[in-house]
Amino acid sequence: MQILEIVFMFIKAFAVGGLICLIAQVVINFTDLTAGKILVMFMLAGVVLTALGLYRPLVEFAGAGATVPISGFGYLLANGAMKGAQEGLFQALTGPLAAASAGVSAAVIFSFIMALIFKSHTKYN
């Protein structure tokens, strides 16, 4: 790959990821929705856009810019369910778990390691 292609990939990922974050920030600033509701809304948006066939082209265009935000987690779950559904009902239910298991496992393991290394305290101490 030439250096220009790599730079262009970074620019696309940054632009799309930034746009998703911009939308989230607008929702935070102009609504009274809690962080949990916004998180669920973006995750479900990823699921719905995947079901409609609109999120995959975004992932192919932007790569990590589309898969790293929480909407990318919805894409991952929906994609796992659709692949599993091709094999049967049970696989449709377990497909999302299999698709997301590596990321969730890494988050739990690294969180545990950080908890062992650093002393936790409240924000106001």
Image (cartoon, grey):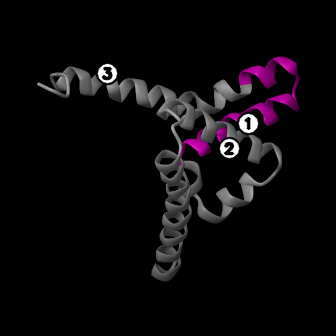
Q: Crowdedness of circle 3 by 10 Å Cα count: few (<14), some, many (20+)?
A: few
User: Which residue position is annotated with label 1?
Assistant: 78
Q: Secondary structure at mark 1?
A: helix
Q: In the image, which disc is placed on residue 28?
A: none
Q: Are marks 2 and 1 in contact (CB under 8 Å)?
A: yes
Say whether residue 38 is left or right of residue 74: left
Q: Which residue is mark 2?
A: 46
Residue 68 % position (x, y):
52, 48
Question: What separation in Å lies between label 3 and label 2 (alpha carbons)?
Answer: 28 Å
To which quarter of the image does residue 123 belong? top left
Residue depth check, mark 3 versus mark 2: number of the one nearer the observer: 2
In this rendering, position of residue 109 left or right of residue 98: left
Residue name at image x 21 percent, y 20 percent? 116
Q: Report the residue marked by disc 3.
A: 112
On the rendered image, what quadrant is the C terminus found in?
A: top left
Residue in view at x 15 percent, y 27 percent: 124
Q: Nearer the viewer, residue 100 or 52?
A: 52
